[in-house]
Image (cartoon, rainbow, N blue to C red):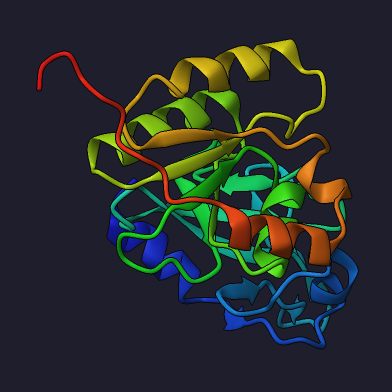
């Protein structure tokens, strides 16, 4: 799937506003989101837009990108954010960036959309990977590009596989674990905001090659 194909589909949709029902329901910031409107065919009947066999009419749409912010795909979000539909429809392609990420600023990387929304609403910049495999690839590529990453250790509570994955990724340069004692999405916005402000800039680990 080419970047132009992705952008052609992305440009079909209108920007979301603060009045969109899903923006309100998911408590997210509308900036950077678009939505799939209800449309009608020539007979005046409602026409549903589909990705594969899944109806995405009314969904919010996010543009997913690679670690260099180049378009990769689209994520269609409904009322259940755990059931994201992706374009191309065969799986996750790229990650979803939320919040303003300044150059040379550390960025939080998470798997779930709920964690990403909570982190952005608290004032942080975040990338949502949607899957463990994509999470590993994204963090590895960001690290190689010299972008500092924070990884929340307790993002999935007692998920042993996730904790092992994060602990392994913490061996990379420019990567640091956040030892949060509760999940991001369950934290209060003011508590998360204070946590974000107190985060030190990740230090580059010492290397035996230098």
- Asked if 55 appears above or below 133 in the picture, the reply is below
Q: Does 12 sit left or right of 131 as displayed?
A: left
At a point 73% along the width and 37% down the height, the residue shown is 180
Q: Does 194 sit left or right of 202 as displayed?
A: right
- Asked if 108 appears above or below 152 in the picture, the reply is below
Residue 117 visible in image: no
- Residue nearest the observer in this picture, 33 or 145: 145
To which quarter of the image does residue 110 belong?
A: top right
x then y, percent, for residue 112: 70, 42
Quadrant where the C terminus sits is top left
At a point 11% along the width and 16% down the height, the residue shown is 209
x then y, percent, for residue 143: 31, 36
At a point 82% along the width and 26% down the height, the residue shown is 157
- Residue nearest the observer in this picture, 49 or 73: 73
x then y, percent, for residue 100: 49, 71
- Residue nearest the observer in this picture, 161 or 199: 199
Quadrant where the N terminus sits is top left
- Asked if 187 appears above or below 207 in the picture, the reply is below
């Amino acid at each position: 799937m080419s970047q132009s194909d992705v952008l052609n589909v992305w440009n079909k949709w209108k920007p979301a506003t603060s009045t969109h029902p899903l923006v309100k329901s998911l408590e997210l910031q509308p900036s950077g989101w678009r939505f799939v409107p209800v449309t009608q065919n020539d007979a005046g009947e409602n026409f549903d837009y589909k990705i594969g066999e899944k109806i995405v009419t009314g969904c919010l749409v996010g543009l997913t990108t690679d670690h260099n912010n180049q378009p990769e795909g689209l994520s269609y979000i409904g009322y259940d954010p755990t059931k994201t539909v992706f374009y191309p429809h065969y799986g996750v392609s790229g990650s979803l960036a939320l919040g303003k990420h300044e150059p040379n600023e550390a960025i939080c990387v998470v798997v779930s959309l709920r964690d990403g929304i909570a982190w952005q609403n608290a004032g942080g910049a975040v990338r949502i990977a949607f899957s463990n495999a994509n999470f590993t690839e994204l963090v590895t590529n960001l690290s190689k590009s010299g972008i500092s990453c924070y990884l929340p250790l307790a993002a999935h509570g007692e998920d042993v596989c996730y904790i092992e994955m994060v602990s392994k990724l913490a061996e990379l340069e420019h990567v640091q674990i956040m030892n949060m004692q509760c999940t991001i999405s369950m934290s209060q916005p003011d508590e998360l905001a204070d946590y974000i402000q107190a985060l030190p800039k990740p230090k580059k680990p010492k290397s035996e090659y230098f």
